[in-house]
Amino acid sequence: MFMLRWTWRAILLALCALVAVQFWFLAHIWYWADHNPESTAFMRARLEILRETNPRARLQQRWVPYGRISGYLKQAVVAAEDDKFMDHWGFDWDAMRVAHERNVREGEIVSGASTISQQLAKNLFLPSRRVWWRKAQEAMITVMLEALLTKRRILELYLNVAEWGEGVYGADAAARHHFGVPAAALSRAQAAQLAVMLPSPRSYTPAVETSYLQRQSAVILERMSYARIP
C-alpha cells in the first residue's frame, strides 16, 4: 500500500510538471503574438557549438517586420516548404501520409512533411538533438502556435528565425549574406534560391550557383505564382 501511494504521488507530480511546462510554452507564444523573440533554442544551441572553436563567434540576425520582407520570398518559402500553409491548422496530413509511405518503401527516413508551423515550433523551443519526446512536444507547440497566432505572424516569425547559412538567421541576414541586398529588395530568382537552401542551409556558399540550386530554383519559380500567402 505504501509503495502504491508513492507511485501515484510520483505520477501526479510528473503530470503537474508536464502541465507547468506546457503553460510555459503557452505564455511565451502568447507574448510573441506582438513581441519579437530575441533568439530561439536552435540559435542558442548553434551559437554554443560555434563558440567551441571561436569564443567570439556571433550570429548574423536582424529582425525585419513582415512588410519589409520581399513578397517573392514569402511566396517562394511557402511554395517550397508548405504549399498548404493557408489551409491547414498546423499539420499537412496528406503530405505526412505520402512521406510515411516513402520512408517505409525506402526502409529509412528519407522524407519529412513538417509544415512551417511545425518547423517554427522546433526552432523556437526544441533542442536540435533527437530525443524520444520531441515529436509529441513539437505537435503540442504547433497546436498552440496555430491557436494563438495568425498565419501572417507565424510566417513573419519563421522568416525571421530560419537558418540560411553558418550563423546566418532570418530573411534580412540571409539576403545580405548571399546577395548583398536587404530582405525587401530580393528579386524573384533570389527568393527562389533562398527557399531551396532551407533544408540544408550550411551547404551553400554566397554567390555560388550549383547545378542543383539552379534546377530546384526553377521548380520553385514555377510554383510561386500559385502560392497563397497571408
Image (cartoon, rainbow, N blue to C red):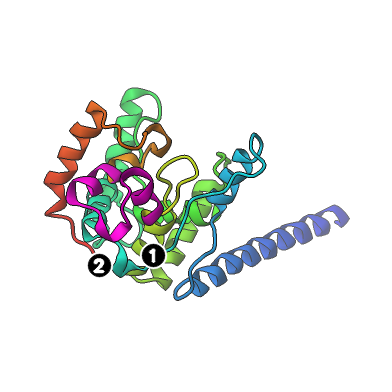
Query: Helix, strand or loop at disc 2?
Result: loop
Callout 1 crowding tier (Cα within 10 Å): few <14, some 14–19, many ≥20: many
Residue 182 is left or right of residue 217, and the answer is: right
Q: Is residue 129 highlighted in magenta?
A: no
- Give the CA separation, mark 2 to mark 1: 16 Å
User: Which of the image's four quarters has the C terminus?
Assistant: bottom left
Measuring 37% from the left and 34% from the top, which residue is drawn there?
205
Which residue matches tag 2? Answer: 230
Measuring 40% from the left and 26% from the top, which residue is drawn there?
108
Q: In this view, does 57 lie above or below 38?
A: above
Q: Is residue 184 highlighted in magenta?
A: yes
Measuring 45% from the left and 59% from the top, which residue is drawn there?
62
Residue 59 is left or right of residue 91, and the answer is: right
Mark 2 and mark 1 lie on one chain; the one further toward the N terminus is 1
Residue 141, disc? none
Residue 66 location, x and y as percent?
33, 67
Image quarter of residue 86: bottom left
**What amino acid does circle 2 point to?**
Pro
Residue 193 location, x and y as percent?
26, 42
Characterize the magenta stretch by its predominant secondary structure: helix
Which residue matches tag 1? Answer: 64
Query: Helix, strand or loop at disc 1?
Result: loop
Q: What stretch is highlighted in magenta?
A: 172-194
Which residue is outermost to the top? 107
Which residue is outermost to the front? 180
Callout 2 crowding tier (Cα within 10 Å): few <14, some 14–19, many ≥20: few
